[in-house]
Amino acid sequence: MKKALIAMSGGVDSSAAVWLMKEKGYDCMGVTMKLHEEMGEEACRIGKTCCSLDDVEDARSVAVRLGIPYHVFNFKEDFEKQVIGRFIHAYEIGATPNPCIDCNRYLKFERLYQRAKELGYDIIVTGHYARIEQDPDTGRWLLKKGMDAQKDQSYVLYQLTQEQLAHTCLPLGIYTKPEIREIAEKLELRNAHKAESQDICFVPDGDYAAFIRRHTGKEYPPGNFVDAQGKVLGRHKGLIHYTVGQRRGLGIAAPEPYYVCEKRYATNEIVLGTATELLVNEFQVSDLNWIAIADLTEPRKVMMRTRYHQKEFEATLFPCTDDRVRVVSSNPVQRPAPGQAAVFYDGDVVVGGGVIQ
C-alpha cells in the first residue's frame, strides 16, 4: 500500500483531502507544520489563521475521526528564514513579496517533502485547488488550473519542480468548494463550515509595516513623493508602507487620482502618477521556473497573471541571456509590482513563472 503524508492546516480543504486519499487506498498520516507564534491571540480573535492552536486541534480532531495518525512538525526556524526573512527584506528594498508562494516553495514542497521522503512516504498531499497530470507525449509533469475557477490556486504553485510534481497529489483539483464542504458535512467534520484562512497568516491584522518594525526593531524614514519629472508632491511615511499600483492612503490632493508608479530604494523616493502613467507594455521577470517546457528558447505567446485573482492578459515572452524573460503585453497593463509573481499559462496549463523585476 502506498503511503501519503497529508499537510493539514486545520481547514476544511486539507481535511477533505484526507478522506479522498483514504478512498484511493493510501496509507495516510496527517501533519500540521508549526510555523510561527506571532500574535496568536489576535489572530484567533480576527479569525484569519492557518496554524494556530485552534487549527492544530481541528486537524487533530479530523485525523482521529478519519482514523489516521497525526503529528505536528516544528518548522519555525525554516519559516523565519525562508518566509518572514524574505518578506521583510523584500519590503526593505522596495519590492512587494508574496509570502504564500515562498511558504509553498520552501516549506510545503521542500522542507515537508524532504521529511516525507525521510519517513518513507511516497507522496505529499495538500488541499490546493489545482491539478497535476503527466504529459503522455513528453513525459513532463504538468500543473493545471483547478476545475473551480473561483478557487484555482495554480498561481501560487508555479515554483513546483518536476520531482516535486511527480511526488505530489492535489485531490481537490477536480472539485468545487461547495462540493468539498458537502463532503465534510457528510463526514460530520467539526470544520465543515470553517471560514477561509488568510494567506499572510503571520500578519493577521494586515498591518505589514507595523509587523516589520516590530520584528526588526528598526524605523523606516519618511521621504518624498515625486512625479516622473522629480517634482516634490508631498511626504511619504516610509517605503514599507506602499506598493506599486496603490492609490489609497497617499494623502495627496490632485485633480485626478495618483497611484504609486515606482519605489526608489536608493533615494527613498516614491514616484506617483496618473492611471495612464501607471500603464506599461513591457517588463522583466527573473528567478524562473519552467513546468510545461524545459526552457524558453524562442519567443512564445502566453496568457498570464501578475496578481493572484487578476484577469489573465495576453503577452509574448522573449528569452534573455541571464535567466530572465522580457514580457511584452499585447495591450497596455497596469505596472506590476516588483517582487510579485508572474505566472504564464497555455489554456489550463501552467507554462512556468518567475518574479517581477
Image: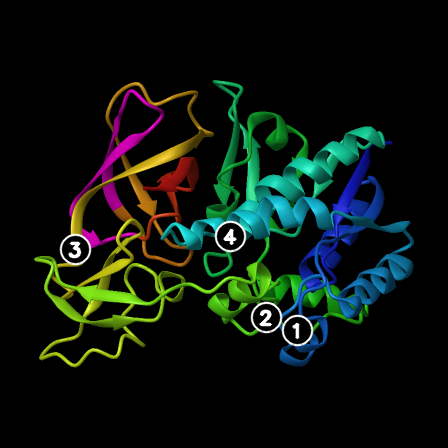
Q: Residue at x 87, y 31 (%)?
A: 1
Q: Which residue is mark 2?
A: 204
Q: Which residue is mark 1?
A: 43
The type of residue carrying mark 1 is Ala
In three-dimensional space, the C-alpha distance between marks 4 and 1, rounded to whole angstroms, equals 19 Å
Query: N-terminal of the two: label 3 or label 4?
Result: 4
In three-dimensional space, the C-alpha distance between marks 3 and 4, rounded to whole angstroms, equals 26 Å
In three-dimensional space, the C-alpha distance between marks 2 and 4, rounded to whole angstroms, equals 15 Å
Question: What x and y, as percent, mark residue 132?
Answer: 57, 37
Q: Taking 108 as reference, is 271 left or right?
A: left
The type of residue carrying mark 2 is Pro
**Region of the chain picked out in magenta, as a range:** 314-336
Q: How is the image coloured?
A: rainbow
The type of residue carrying mark 3 is Leu
Residues at badges 1 and 3 in contact (C-beta under 8 Å)? no
Q: Which residue is mark 3?
A: 279
Comparing marks 3 and 4, which lies closer to the viewer?
A: 4
Circle 3 — which element? Answer: strand
Comparing marks 4 and 1, which lies closer to the viewer?
A: 4
Query: N-terminal of the two: label 2 or label 3?
Result: 2
Residue 325 within the segment the image draws in magenta: yes
In three-dimensional space, the C-alpha distance between marks 1 and 2, rounded to whole angstroms, equals 5 Å
The foreground one among 57 and 64 is: 57
Query: N-terminal of the two: label 4 or label 1?
Result: 1
Residues at badges 2 and 4 in contact (C-beta under 8 Å)? no
Q: Which residue is mark 4?
A: 87
